[in-house]
């Protein structure tokens, strides 16, 4: 089998490398010449654990190629994957599909013989049908099927998610197209991965419904956490207590500063817009979007409160800027709401993140970026953990106490235990775990 992967962004590159690992011959295509040159030299433009080795070994085996020549790559392919960006359109929150349709036109002109055209990018319901129309209008004699095959990759564990998925969803409406897709995912049949075949619209809907459901689950536990703080309950035990019910499930019930990243904020918003357009508004998702936006802003207030109600002239040490660990991705990270609010309130902010500081520098003004976690701390009034990188899970408390003005920590990821921090002599604030327990209406502990 031979495929072309159009777009070497996060999804395209990970999917292309993983398909080549499955034994498929893959040509990754991108318009960006310098990116393709770098990829040919084995330089990976994103941070994703294991991706460099996967690309190197499959390129060396002759199964993974990089080119700017779309025509050549598509001509030889049994299937062509569209994995280009679908950013939120400025102004209305709809997904911008111009790159998808642009790719469809180019593919139509280059196709040679029966070709399956697969949308891998996250696209609103109805887009597959539009792609079909674009191809047909560009090339009346084209022999093709359009298939929807959404990705469910988490940044930081994308390779494992691709190789050992909970399920694969494929919207394919002819037996010929289904057979091509079965061949591509042949390896997953061996490990008994459920592969769900649906029509185009259903597959597109599954992707949005999955991400929106997960965003709702996170937002639910975040609100429960706020209530726990007032009521004297421990949100982690609540999450466990409800999650052990198989109907609820334990995953995605970790409270925090609000979800971020390249998918949840964009996809929830796009689904809200789509639902309104169809005259079937998703009020629950509209509320989730609103709560999550406000939550990120409210997190700065927690840090201000820990600083005694005013951060003017005070030094705040920030650990973690990326939207989650094991990625350099800053898109819709809570830090983008929190740090500027602190700077605007007159704080001197010193920050460290193991991978995302190059990105962060472009997005934040008035911040001193430090080389290590401990470099943020000298003379600091408050230390705040914004991302749960492993290296922040075992900080040296003695060293922190020697460096900071006073040991005050705001832990927005619940990396530490309130009791342990109290014993270590810290004034400690986390999410949904008041300390000591039973103190109703007490401050978050
Ligand atoms: C997500 C989906 O998980 C994936 O299936 C989809 O295809 C792409 O979007 P990703 O954005 O990489 O993946 O990250 P994920 O691990 O899902 O986390 C998203 C956000 O939710 C992060 O900001 C994270 O910190 C937050 N989160 C996650 C919580 O606050 N609590 C949780 O329990 C889980």
Image (cartoon, rainbow, N blue to C red):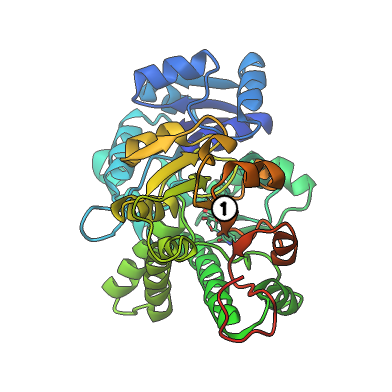
Residue 40, image x, y percentages: 50, 15
Q: Is residue 329 left or right of residue 401?
A: left
Q: Nearer the viewer, residue 325 or 180?
A: 325
What is the tally of numbered marks visible in this picture? 1
Q: Residue at x 31, y 33 (%)?
A: 106
- Ligand 1's quadrant is bottom right
Q: Residue furthest left?
A: 91
Residue 99, image x, y percentages: 30, 41
Q: Secondary structure at mark 1?
A: loop
Q: Quadrant of the C terminus?
A: bottom right
Q: Residue at x 66, y 56 (%)?
A: 415
Residue 116 visible in the current orientation: no
Note whether 262 is above or below 414 in the view shown.
above
Q: Quadrant of the N terminus?
A: top right
Q: Residue at x 46, y 16 (%)?
A: 38
| Cβ at disc 1 under 8 Å from ligand 1 | no
Residue 137 visible in the current orientation: yes
Give the quarter of the image for residue 267: bottom left
Q: Is residue 352 left or right of residue 191?
A: left
Which residue corresponds to mark 1?
406
Give the quarter of the image for residue 312: bottom left
Give the quarter of the image for residue 444: bottom right
Note whether 17 is above or below 35 in the view shown.
below
Q: Residue at x 33, y 44 (%)?
A: 100
Q: Nearer the viewer, residue 150 or 229?
A: 229
Residue 41, image x, y percentages: 52, 12
Q: Is residue 87 left or right of residue 155?
A: left
Residue 386, image x, y percentages: 52, 52
Q: Nearer the viewer, residue 137 or 383?
A: 383
Q: Nearer the viewer, residue 134 or 276?
A: 276
Note whether 352 is above or below 401 in the view shown.
above
């Amino acid at each position: 089998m031979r495929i072309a992967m159009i777009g070497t962004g996060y999804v395209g590159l990970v999917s292309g490398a993983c398909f080549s690992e499955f034994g498929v011959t893959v040509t990754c295509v991108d318009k960006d010449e310098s990116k393709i040159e770098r990829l040919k030299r084995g330089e990976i433009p994103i941070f994703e654990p294991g991706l460099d080795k996967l690309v190197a070994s499959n390129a060396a085996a002759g199964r993974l190629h990089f080119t700017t020549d779309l025509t050549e790559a598509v001509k030889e392919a049994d299937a062509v994957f569209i994995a280009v960006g679908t950013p939120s359109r400025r102004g209305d929150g709809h997904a911008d599909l111009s790159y998808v349709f642009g790719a469809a036109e180019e593919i139509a002109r280059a196709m040679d013989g029966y070709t399956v055209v697969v949308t891998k990018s996250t696209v609103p319901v109805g887009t597959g049908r539009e792609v079909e129309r674009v191809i047909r209008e560009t090339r009346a004699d084209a022999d093709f099927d359009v298939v929807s095959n959404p990705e469910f990759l988490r940044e930081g564990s994308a390779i494992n998610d691709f190789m050992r998925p909970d399920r694969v969803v494929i919207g394919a409406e002819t037996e010929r197209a289904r057979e091509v897709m079965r061949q591509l995912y042949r390896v997953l049949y061996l490990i008994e991965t459920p592969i769900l075949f649906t029509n185009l619209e259903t597959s597109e809907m599954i992707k949005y419904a999955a991400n929106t459901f997960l965003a709702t689950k996170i937002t639910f536990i975040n609100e429960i956490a706020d209530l726990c703080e007032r009521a004297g309950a421990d949100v982690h035990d609540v999450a466990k207590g409800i999650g052990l019910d198989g109907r609820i499930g334990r995953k995605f019930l970790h409270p925090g500063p609000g979800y971020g990243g390249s998918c949840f904020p964009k996809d929830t918003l796009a689904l809200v817009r789509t639902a309104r357009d169809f005259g079937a508004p998703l009020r629950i998702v509209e509320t989730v979007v609103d709560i999550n936006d406000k939550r990120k802003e409210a997190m700065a207030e927690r840090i201000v409160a820990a600083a005694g109600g005013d951060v003017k002239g005070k030094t705040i040490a920030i650990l973690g800027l990326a939207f989650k660990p094991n990625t350099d991705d800053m898109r819709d990270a809570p830090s983008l709401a929190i740090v500027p609010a602190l700077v605007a309130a007159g704080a001197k902010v010193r920050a460290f993140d193991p991978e995302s500081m190059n990105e962060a520098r472009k997005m934040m003004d008035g911040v001193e970026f430090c080389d290590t976690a401990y470099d943020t701390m000298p003379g600091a009034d408050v230390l705040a953990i914004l991302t749960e990188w492993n290296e922040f899970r075992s900080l040296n408390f003695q060293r922190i106490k020697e460096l900071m003005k006073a040991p005050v920590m705001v832990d927005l990821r619940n990396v530490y235990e309130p009791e342990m921090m109290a014993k270590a002599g810290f004034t400690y604030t986390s999410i949904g775990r008041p300390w000591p327990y039973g103190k109703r209406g007490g401050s978050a502990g």
